[in-house]
Image (cartoon, rainbow, N blue to C red):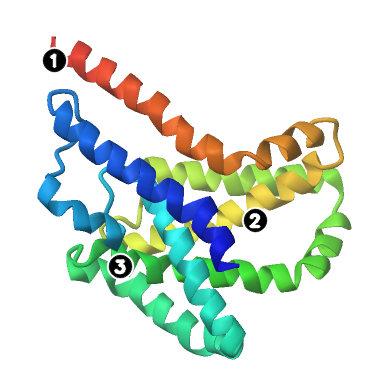
Amino acid sequence: FFKKKLIRILVPYLFLAFSSLFGKYMLPNIAKNSYSLENWWHILLGIPPMGPLWFLWSLFAVMLIYSVAFFKNKKINYFIVLPVSLALLLFYPLTGGALEGVLKVFRYQFYFLIGLFLRERYKGIKDFVSGIKDIYKIIVSFISISIIILIALFNPFLKLNSVATIVLSTVFGVVGFYILSCYISKTKAAKIFTELSEYSMDIYILSYFVVLVLEIIYRKIDTN
């Protein structure tokens, strides 16, 4: 298990992180943000020079924490790791970004464990959703996704607590897109989405380079 995750997740993370580090050092004029060579060891703490790589670092770390606790005693995840992760999720903003990469691991461990909890009960959830008429699936999905968009545009909880925004967006996102996927699974488009999902990790990483080029062009236009 560890070897598989090491090759699939950690190796790409380290390769891309150090590649972007030297890239920013060699081409500082077009770099999105500075990153000193002296801080190379921050990469090992989950603070990479290429922003989107936080996902790979967090994913590898939470899987590692989960697997150790799971093989030792599965209840450790739900009665110790989950509460600690939730506490860090709620109080992380108060730390002022201290140990960003390390704390981020435990924050997202909360979502990882929630996902595993739902996975163990997936059959019952799927049977329940399958019993809902297609028209209601579309309505619920539309409402949930609309709420996410409204939160993103107006962010009513920003001054109160940014965590509230994250949690609400997560809940409505899971509900809306899961029910929508159940509807799509019955259409011809299901095959396309299934094939795309097999390369989702690769698409996520490679898409950054497209975004990076567009950002550089935009900044040059804006500056001129």
Mark 3 and mark 2: Cα distance apart in space: 29 Å
Q: Which mark is residue 102?
A: 3
Amino acid type for the residue under numbered disc 1: Thr
- Return the disc, 3 or 2, that comes first in the chain's sequence: 3
Q: Is residue 180 visible?
A: yes
Point 21% across, 58% down: residue? 41
Question: Considering the numbered disc 3 on the image, is that residue within a helix, a strand or a loop?
Answer: helix
Point 53% across, 83% down: residue? 69
Q: Position of residue 10 (x, y in %)?
A: 44, 55
Determine whether, in the image, residue 84 is placed left or right of residue 182.
Answer: left
Q: Is 69 above or below relative to 124?
A: below
Foreground disc of the pair 2, 1: 1
Q: Position of residue 196 (x, y in %)?
A: 67, 35
Q: Is 143 above or below relative to 32?
A: below
- Return the disc, 2 or 1, that comes first in the chain's sequence: 2
- Return the disc, 1 or 3, that comes first in the chain's sequence: 3
Query: Which residue position holds label 2?
Result: 175
Q: Which mark is residue 223?
A: 1
